[in-house]
Every structure is written in C-alpha cells, then in structure tokens.
Amino acid sequence: MENFKDLPVEVRLSAYIDGQVGEDDKRELEALLATDPHAREILDLLTAGSDFGNQAFAEMLKEPVPLNLVRAIKETSTKPQAPVRQAANSNVVSFFRFIPQAIAASAVLLLAGGYSGYFIGMKNAAQAPSEISETSAFEAPAGATNGAKTRSFTFDSPAPISLPAIAVTSVADVHDVYSKETTRLAEVPATEAASLKSWLAASTGVTFNIPDLAADGLNFQGGRLVAVDGNPTGALYYKDAKNEVVAIYFTKGTATSGQTAQGANQYLSGSKGDTAWFVAGPNGDSALKDIASKASAAL
Amino acid sequence: MSNQAKADQISRELVTLLPKLRRFAMTLTRNASDADDLVQEACERAITRSHLWNGEGRLESWIYAMTRNLWVDEVRKRKVRTGGGTVDASEQDELIVEANAEKAIYATQLHKMILSMPEGLSSVFLLVNVEGHSYKEAAEILEIPIGTVMSRLSTARLKLAAMINGTREARA
C-alpha cells in the first residue's frame, strides 16, 4: 500500500471513520478538519453515505429466502459425501494408461523403502543393547521404535456452532412492519397450515407445532418466513376479536427470558434448547404470558 | 467428526446464513436470479468440501471467498461466450443500472440504488461498513490489495451519499 499521507483526502477520512489510522495520522486529520471546511464537508458526506448504505443493506435482509434454495442446500447435505479421494476408474483403457506411472512409482517406493529400512536398521544396530548388536542391519525389525519419533493421530474436533443471540429490539423491528399489514398479514394462510409448517421447519431448522390459541380468543391467520438480524425466522400470526395482532416468532438462537415493552407492543421472550422464541402482542394484553407458555410448549 | 457429520453441521449453519449470503451475492451479480444460483452453487461446494473447513474464523468469510471465486469464473465464462467484458470498479466512474436490476424481485428504490453501484464498490462496502470485516479480511475475501479496499470504500460512501437526494425525491 502506498504511503497513507499520499492517499486522497477522502480515502484518509474514510479510514478515519473506521478508526484505521495511526495516532499521528489521526492528529493530522483532526487538525485538518478543524481548519478546512471542505474536509469537514467530505467527512459529513462519507458519514451520511455510510449510514444510508447501512440502512439500505439492512432492508435487503428482510427479503424472504426462496424455499427452493433452502431445499437444495438441505438435499446436498443429505447426499452421502464422496470420499476425498475417488476410487480408481475401472475403465480398462485408463488402467493400462497408468501402468508406466505405476511401475515408476513402485520403483521409487521400493528404493525409498529399501533405503529407509537400511537407515533404520543401521540406527537400531548402533543403539540396540549388546545382545542384539550383532544382528544384521537388514534383519532389524522394521517396526523397531528405538529412538524413533512416534506419530499421533487426532480426529477433528467438532467446530463450535455459535448460536446467535436474538435481541428483542430486532424482533420488534420486524413485528412493527408485518403486524401493520391488513390484507397480507400472512404469506401462507391458515388454510394451508401443513404447507406452512413444513416450509418454516425447512427454512428455520426448528421443529414446531402451530399452537391452537382459540381458547385465548385468538384466530390463527397464517404465517411467513422473516429475517431477524439475518436469521431465518418463523412467524405465526393470530388476531383477536378486536383485530389486534398477536405473533409468535422462532429461530435458531438464544433469547433472554423476560418481558419488554416497545412502542405499542409488548414482547415476551425465551429460549428452548437451541431455539429462541418471542411472543408479540399489544400492550396490556394479560393473556400473553399464557400464550407464551403455549408457544414454548409447541417448540 | 465424520465428513458426513461435518457436512450436515455446515449445511445447518448455511441455512441460517442464507439471507447474508444472498445479500453478498447480490453485490456481485446485481440481479436476484444470478445471486440465488450463485449462492446455491457456493453452498453446494462448501458442503461437498466441508472437510476443508477448519472451524477457525467466520464461516461466512470462507463462503464469501468461495462465492466470489465462483462468480469470477462465471464472469470469465460469459466473457468468452459473448466476447464482452466487464470494467473493474476502480476504473469505472459512472453508475451502471442493469436492465435486470429493474426486473429484480428486490425492486425497491433502495435496492435498485445499491444494485446500481459497480460490483467492486458495493461488495467492499457491505463487508467493511455493514458487516464489520476488517480491511484485511475484506481484501482476502475479494482478493484485492488493502489500498484498493480503502479507495473503493470511500468511493462507495460518497456515491451512496449522492444517492440520498434521489431517495428523498422518490419518497416525495
């Protein structure tokens, strides 16, 4: 990379925003910003562009993931994985094609083996106790380990799977958008509950049952797949007699147990196994705790 | 852990990463259809090569690099087929609005603006500004020098700032 000081001022200010400048450069840029209105203007533009871009890219995460893409990935993993090295081609022509290479490789291995055996034998003969010191080098056991290093084999330890911590505020952002939908609250209606269930289970990796909340005065409307902080999340929507929306959200992750009020809604949250769940409903709805326990039981 | 178990584990993690992978792919392809094809191919490759994943660092960085390499190959193939070419983002001054972008599923004003940015700019911006990758990580994923990451990032920020007025006009 060329000298930092030689870079255009907008590049240096952009790095300044990211805290990617050294102390000297930082002081120099701050002095420039204190005296040069043009530099301040550039910094303001860079910051504004940064914020605007963040917002635009966050919007992109809200798009539902096509079900066929999820299926294709799951199907790939269920196919038996081919061994790292493929079996030799049984084709006779290709077999004969490799004979010269096989002979050459065998010769090399034979020479290497002979040399190694000789070398190990000589070494063992030198280190062996006196009663076997007269043993011919060529008769020394090939597996002798006197003075030899042992090789240990380890198996892959499982890579840790870190479950994302899902914040209530992130769920609230999603709920604010979808709960206001009047005619398209659910992407898959309640009449297609079986299809909805298999879709959301495939997309989120969470096995669940759709809770029947009719006893709580809630009619199931259907559901959809949403993205919460980029995590595929199942959403089930219900409406009460006043047309108020109550929703259940679930995804692979963790959530802090508790109750939070945000805007016009309150949110109950918790984790069950590797699944985070949330129940969202209007403030003051005393039945939400009962609904939350039913939601948790359905996971 | 067996290869199959590792493949299953990676597959589960990939499903949760899908929205992010699609978003990254969109910055490369700038249309939804190509992005989904690219993500599918990258995920399939990651699963079949799961024995190569050592569990260190972010899984998405590994997949991003794979996605980027696949896309470079695809662009090369298309170039051969059509005889056309692409201009590197650093050499491109004007925004490109692809015809496909107009038809894309992501047809909101914001998305169209993002998709109109040259590929090199939006990828760097996404990795560093949005997802918090370091300059070095972004440079490794995209296989470009750190200096290029810095210059593309500042260009992307300025181009995005210039788009703000467009968004306001669209809302009005």
Image (cartoon, coloured by chain):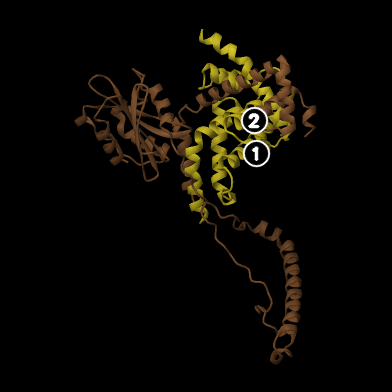
In the image, taking residue A191 as reference, residue B132 lies left or right, namely right
SS for tag 2?
loop
Label 2 environment density (alpha carbons within 10 Å; few <14, some 14–19, many ≥20): some
- Colour of the chain lettered B: yellow
Looking at the rendered structure, the kind of residue marked 2 is Asp
**Which residue appears farthest toward the left when viewing the image?**
A215
Residue A201, percent from left and from top? 38, 38
The correct choice, above or below, for A143 with respect to A225 in the image is below
Residue A270, percent from left and from top? 35, 39
Looking at the rendered structure, the kind of residue marked 1 is Glu
The correct choice, above or below, for A73 with respect to A109 in the image is above
What is the chain identity of the residue bearing mark 2?
Answer: A
Residue A261, percent from left and from top? 35, 27
In the image, taking residue B90 as reference, residue B41 lies left or right, namely left
Tell me where residue A120 sits by quadrant. bottom right
Residue denoted by label 2: A18
Residue denoted by label 1: B137
**Which residue appears farthest toward the bottom when viewing the image?**
A131
Chain letter, brown:
A
